[in-house]
Amino acid sequence: MTLPRELNVRTRGDLAWAISVGGIATVSFTTFVVFAWYFASTLFLIFSGILLAVALSALSQLAGRLTGGPHPLRLTLVCVLLAAMLGGVLYLGGSTIADQAKVLSGTLKSQIVNVKTYLDQHGVDTSYFDVNSILSETPKDGVKDGVKLPKPPEIPGTVAPTTAPIPRTSNLPNAGTIASSGGAIVTQTLKILLGTVGAVGNFFIVLFLGLSFAAQPGIYRDGLLHLTPVKHRGRMSIIVDRVSDTLQRWLIAQMVTMVAVGVVTWLGLKLIGIPSSFILGVQAGLLAFIPTVGAILGGLIVVLASLASGWLAAASAFALFLAVHALESYILTPILQRQALDIPPATLFAFQIMLGVVFGVWGLALALPVLAIVKVIIDFLREEEETSAQETPAT
C-alpha cells in the first residue's frame, strides 16, 4: 500500500525532526558531562554557597517564629549571632585551639609511625602506606611539635649505608648551592602562599555566595523559573520548593547532630584524660557532616591520638567512639531527620564512594545533599506519573 505524497513528506519531516532533537540532546548532555568533569570543583564551590544560603534562610525562618520582623532584619540578626559566637570561641579559646592542634598533629604523626613499626615487626606488609613524607619530616633529634617521634623501623639483615666524609675545601657555599637553596625556599614559600590564598579565597567565595543567595532568595528563585520553558514552570516551581524545604530541614537536623557529637566527644575524651580533647571534639563534630565516612575518619583520628596515652585510654576512646556513633545513628538521626530524608544507608554509602572516587573530597562531603536533590526529583516524577495513570481511564 502506497502512502499519499503529503503524508509521506510529513512522516519524513517528523523523522528528521526527531533525529535532530535526539542529536541536539545527546550533544548537550555530553557537553554538560564534560563541563561538569573539568569544572567539578567550581560547581561544588557554588553548591556549597547555595547550601550555606539554605542554612541561613532556615535559621532566619526559625528566628522569625520567635521574634517576627522582615526577612533582611532576621537574616542580619542570625549573621551577627553566628559571627559573635565564632568570635567568642576564637577570642576565649584561640590559643588553646592552636596549641592543641599543634600537639595533636605531632601526636598523630608519632602514632602513625608507631603503628607502622608494630605492623612491620609482626610481618604485615605496609609498603602500600605512604608514610615516607611523615618520616622525612622527622627532625634529627626526633622531636616534632613537642612530641618525641620514634625512629624508623630497621629491617633485619640490612646494614645502614655508610658514606665517606667529603673533605671541605671551604666553609662558604658555592654559587650553585646558594641558587638551588634559594630556589627551593622560594618554591615552598609560593606553594604555602598559594595554598593559603586558595583556601581563604574559597571560604570567602562560599560566604559571599551564601549571603547573596540568602539575602534575596526570591529573586534567584524567580530567575531560575524564568529560564524554564513556560509549560514546565509549574512543575519546576514545585521541585524547587520541595528541594529547598528538604535541604532546610536536613541542614537544621545536621547542625544539631554535629553540635551534639562534638560536645559529647569533647567531654568524653576530657573525662578519659586524652590530651587535645577539645580539638578532637571539634573535628568529630565537623566530620559528622559527612555521614558514615565522616564518623569512621573521626573515630580513627580519636583512637590514633589516644594511643599516646596507653592502651587503656585507646580502648576507652574506642568505646566512646562506638557510643557516639550509636547516639548519632540510632537516636539523633532517626529523630531529627526522619522527616527530612529517607535514603537507605547502603545507597548513600555507595553514592558517597562513587562521588568521592570521581570528584575527591568535594564529592565525598556533598554526596548526601546531591543525592537528596536527586531523590526529590525522582519522587516528584514518580508521583506525577502515578497521578496521570490514575486519571487516564482504562480501555
Image (cartoon, rainbow, N blue to C red):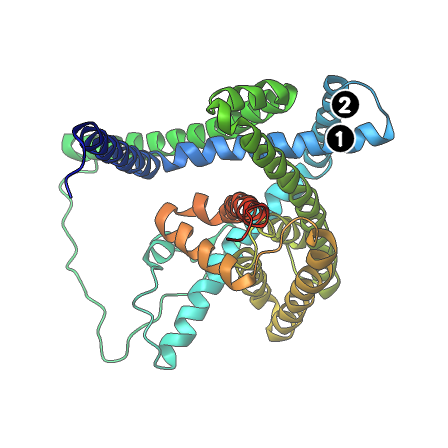
In front here: 287 or 391? 391
Residue ID for mark 1? 61
Q: Secondary structure at mark 1?
A: helix
- Depicted 47 relative to depicted 215: above or below: below
Marks 1 and 2 close (CB-CB < 8 Å): yes
Q: Residue 319 in the image: x percent, y percent?
A: 66, 71
Circle nearer the viewer, 1 or 2: 1
**In this view, 281 is above or below 296:** above
Q: Amino acid at mark 2?
A: Arg
In this view of the protein, which residue sits in the foreground, 264 or 115? 264
Tell me: residue 297, above or below residue 43: below
Query: What type is the residue that disc 1 sits on?
Result: Gln
Numbered badge on residue 74: 2
| Residue in view at x 67 percent, y 30 percent | 56
Residue 297 drawn above or below residue 19: below
Mark 1 vs mark 2, CA separation in Å: 8 Å
Q: Position of residue 338 (x, y in %)?
A: 70, 54
* 237 relative position to 83: left or right: left
Q: From the image, which quarter does the N terminus lie in?
A: top left
Helix, strand or loop under label 2: helix
Q: Is residue 148 visible?
A: no
Do we see residue 331 in this rendering?
yes
